[in-house]
Amino acid sequence: MNATAPSAAEYDYRVFRSSQDGAFVATCAEFPSLSWPADSQTAALAGITTLVDDDLTDMRTSGEEPPPLSRRTYSGKFNIRMPQDLHRRLARESAEQNVSLNQYVVSKLAS
C-alpha cells in the first residue's frame, strides 16, 4: 500500500435523525456497511469517523486497498450537464445503494 493512503477525514459522511433508532445515525458512503448511532450529530459523526479509521487501520494491516470514491473528482457531465454538487450527491447515493451511477440514475428517471 502506498504512503499516501487516505485517512478517515477524507471520506464522505452523512448524519441523519432516525426515528426508528431514536437517535442520530452517521454513515460513510465509501463504507456502506458501517453506521454509528448516537444522541447528538456531533457524537454520531465522531463515532463513525473513529470506526472508519479503525477499518482503515485493519485494511492497511492486511494489505487491502481502501475504497477510492472520496478521491475521485467529478466533471459535472453525465450525458447531460448538471451542477457538480448534484453529480456528487447522485454518486454518493448510488454508492450507498451499491449500484452503478448509471443504474441509479436510470432507476430514478424511470420512477
Image: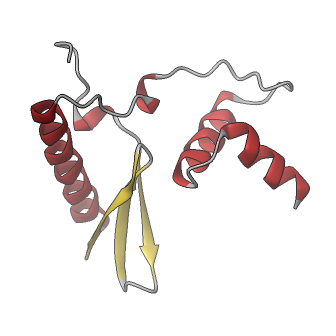
x 65%, y 40%: residue = 100
**Residue 76, located in which quarter of the rendered image?**
top right
The structure residue drawn at horizontal position 61% and vertical position 39%, both measured from the top left corner, is 91
Q: Position of residue 6 (x, y in %)?
A: 26, 26
- In the image, 20: left or right of 104? left
Asked whether 62 or 42 is in front, the reply is 62
In the drawing, does residue 52 fall left or right of residue 97? left
Tell how many labels: 0
Query: In the rendering, at what x and y percent does residue 2 appear?
Result: 20, 13
| Residue 88 horizontal side relative to residue 76, left or right | left
Decide: is 39 above or below 95. below
Position of residue 34 measured from the top left corner of the image (x, y, whole percent): 33, 58
- Residue at 53 percent across and 53 percent down: it is 96
Image coords of residue 97 (percent x, y):
58, 55
Quarter holding the C terminus is bottom right
Q: Is residue 7 above or below residue 74?
A: below
Q: Tell me the quarter of the image containing the N terminus.
A: top left
**Farthest top residue?**
3
Q: Is residue 68 above or below residue 93?
A: above
Q: Nearer the viewer, residue 25 or 55?
A: 55
